[in-house]
Amino acid sequence: MATSLKKTKSVWFCSNCGNEYSKWMGRCPACGECNTMVEKEVVTGGKKAPMQVPGESRRPMPLKEVSTTQEDRISLGSAEVDRLLGGGIVKGSLVLMGGEPGIGKSTLSLQLPLHRPELKTLYVTGEESVKQVKMRADRLGGDASNCLIYSETDMSAILEQAQEVAPDLVIVDSVQTMYCQHVDSTAGSVSQIKDVAAQLLRFAKSSGIPVILIGHITKEGTIAGPKILEHIVDVVLQFEGENRGAYRVLRSIENRFGSTAVLAVFEMTGAGLREVANPSEMLIPMHEEGLSGTAISAMLDGNRPFLFEVQALVSSAVYGTAQRSATGFDVRRLNMLLAVLERRAGFKLGQKDVFLNMAGGLRITDPACDLAVICAVLSSNFDYPIPADVCFAGEVGLSGEIRPVSQASRRAVEAARVGFKRIFVSSYTHFDQKPQGIEVVKVADIPALVRALFK
Ligand code: TYD
Ligand code: MG
């Protein structure tokens, strides 16, 4: 008697963060976004095909018997992309490359195989025609002899061709245009996106062929898109930056085979994306000395220190309530810092509009940036320019104290190398080695900072 145990049931996904719920909710409890629930039918109880990594035992085994040879990695021919991935792409891994439309995802993903013709690459395009890709390839230069281009959006056809061609690398542009026939919804829906990614993951794991999957993400991140996939894929690379500017920042935000919070900077040129090996030089915009409202922060990207500019504009609020806006920085943290300035150091900013901007469209989460933020705000408020050879690295606490940050000496060494003469840090900073060629100014709290800087 063969009875099927398969059942279908409805579940709800938050299209912003990808969390799953058994019922609809107006507001996602996980990420707090409203109206993001999307319904999906799932089949339960059926037998699932096992996902097995080739060459790995499917029985429990003693941990000490697991061999620790390095994962097999393939260089993609771009030093910066290889570094982001932790030393090349791991065989059998699924890498998601997300970013807003027009930021350069297709350009970078086509540039990789063109500049590394040793790799046989299958480039699947669901967005552009074969002709359009060819025109772009001509513009990018390089050697296209080992790059196969395939215009298709049906996943079963794509997987069949990928098996047959057996390339070294598969690129799929983009997840939103692909569809699986057995899923009953249009391309780009939550169910389709999840299934497309799951099928590619299974293909990558079973064949050992790495796959780069491109996904669009909007500024609000509200449409069904890469956010849902972050838990499925092995690596998430995300483009940041302003589409209008020439610079693009690619950041690893999740990586099962390497560190995260690593970033690479590219410049969009007439012939594709050029690697910018030293981000400090791009992130400190060149302008006339003596402008108020800017401060330079000494930051870390993974392990690599770099410097970049924080810009603030403080002006009297004309329409009643003061506005606070921050680009690339958490506005709640900005409000916290402004409250600290008000309560702990007596600066009256309650009736002022405050606008904050991180240079180059970077998104900053490192608390070491706090010190530069408050200095930029104070500099704009008093219209007092901060000397061009001064930079900052410190976290600000709720009682106005300045806290030490990690790897202060590496930050100071980079600052000295780029030409800075003074770095402001917390009094409690410990240096393994005294940095050469730069004066270290130690400050304990905001009043001490103000005395030392605006004297
Ligand atoms: P694209 O890679 O198509 O973006 P995405 O795939 O993320 O949507 O990049 C599009 C932009 O890049 C477009 O505005 C044109 C510009 N571009 C250049 O400036 N130089 C080039 O060599 C190429 C190929 C594109
Ligand atoms: Mg594209």
Image (cartoon, rainbow, N blue to C red):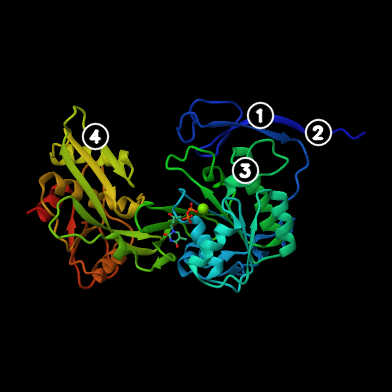
Give the image location of residue 82, x and y in percent.
Answer: 50, 66
Give the image location of residue 422, x and y in percent.
Answer: 18, 64
Q: Mark 1 = which residue?
A: 10
* Disc 3 element: helix
Q: Mark 4 = which residue?
A: 323
Give the image location of residue 136, x and y in percent.
Answer: 51, 62
Q: Quadrant of residue 192?
A: top right
Front position in the image: 238 or 425: 238
User: Are circles 4 and 2 on residues that touch, CB within 8 Å?
Assistant: no
Q: Mark 3 = which residue?
A: 194
User: Are circles 1 and 2 on residues that touch, CB within 8 Å?
Assistant: no
User: Are circles 4 and 3 on residues that touch, CB within 8 Å?
Assistant: no
What is the crowding at mark 4: few (fewer than 14 residues within 10 Å), some, or many (at least 20)?
some
Would residue 418 appear left or right of 63 to someone viewing this image?
left
User: Of the numbered discs in the image, which one, if any, rests on residue 229?
Assistant: none
Q: Mark 1 is on which residue type?
A: Ser
Would residue 299 appear left or right of 292 to someone viewing this image?
right
Q: Quadrant of residue 437?
A: bottom left
Mark closest to the chain's N terminus, 4 or 1: 1
Q: Mark 2 is on which residue type?
A: Leu
Mark closest to the chain's N terminus, 1 or 3: 1
Q: Mark 2 = which residue?
A: 5
What is the crowding at mark 3: few (fewer than 14 residues within 10 Å), some, or many (at least 20)?
some
Camera-side mark, 1 or 2: 1
Mark closest to the chain's N terminus, 1 or 2: 2
As measured in the structure, the alpha-carbon distance from the residue carrying label 1 to the one carrying label 2 is 16 Å
